[in-house]
Amino acid sequence: MCEHDDLAGFARSGRGVTRRRFSQLALGAGLATAWPRASFGAETRGNDVDVATPAGTADAFFVHPVEGKHPGVLIWPDIFGLRPAFKEMATRLAESGYAVLVVNPFYRTQRAPTSPGHANMDDPATRSALMALHDTLTPDTARVDAKALVAYLDQQAAVDPHRKIGTTGYCMGGPLVFQTVASLPDRIGAGATFHGGGLVTDRPDSPHLLIPGMKASFLVAIAQSDDAKQPGAKDSLRDAFSRAKLPAEIEVYAGTKHGWCPPDSPVYDHDQAEKAWSRLLALMGGALQA
């Protein structure tokens, strides 16, 4: 799975999508038609919210079914941050019966948007700015934020505190998922990563070393391009989850490039993103809804 070079590559990639089209998608145009609506159910209500943390005020988007109490889910976005595409993804998940919070992980530096949709991703200055934001995040900031954000979810009337919480992460959000689950093992029941970057490294704080302290079920959806660069990562993950006796579905998605899941991504793969979404719903349904 990827590290800094792949994050930078994702930030500057534009294959298959014109800049004009990418800008439209990033600004929210056409996102509602990117997915089939027939499978959706619950009517939802969503709002931009501010969440108090020990480090300041995190801007986020909270969406949930208008009726009842539901399992909470925390979403960590990719390097492009909190934006319309992730609000749409959160809403789609809420329509399946979840109370969903998607956060701006860079709130310590600036409020969203942290990456304008019209930006030239081939521009070195833009790429450098994205990486600088990424590098403000550490395992310590992840633990602080995870506890504050999960506490916020547990305080919401739409969240069922008697059911486990789930968390998902994309690209750089992958390690944040691992850190969240490990920080709150008795509260988090499901974790899912999609083209997660740097899940297995040779550093002493590698996310995969946190697995023995977890109690959650997992989905790890790996881009084929990431697997080609680090083919042993999936085996390390499988071994770690097996040793911890935790259920984990770990799969390389054929033909995908790093960043294939968000619908505004320049390498979005509709069919494989839908497959990953179906596996996410299966994970959440089994771990949180039972």
Image: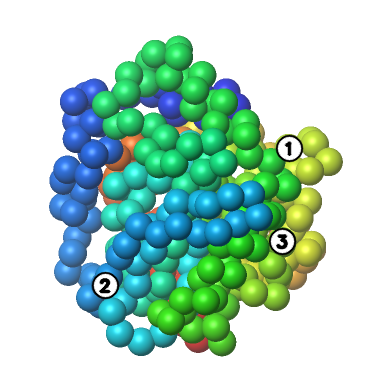
- Under mark 3, the amino acid is Ala
The label shown at residue 182 is 3
Residue 234 visible in rendering: no
Q: Nearer the viewer, mark 2 or mark 1?
A: 2
Where does residue 211 sit, x and y in percent of width and height? 74, 59
Mark 2 to mark 1 CA distance (whole Å): 39 Å
Residue, disc 2: 44
- Residue farthest top in this picture: 124
Above or below, 261 against 190 in this view is above
What residue appears at the point 22 percent right and 55 percent down from the top-left corner?
35
Left or right: 156 in relation to 149: left
Where does residue 19 sit, x and y in percent of width and height? 24, 23
- Residue farthest right in this picture: 204
Mark 2 or 1, nearer chain start: 2
What residue appears at the point 19 percent right and 35 percent down from the top-left corner?
24
Q: Secondary structure at mark 2?
A: strand
Residue, disc 1: 201
Left or right: 160 in relation to 29: right
Where does residue 289 sit, x and y in percent of width and height? 47, 82
Depth check: 160 or 259 in front?
160
Quadrant of the rendered image containing residue 83: top left
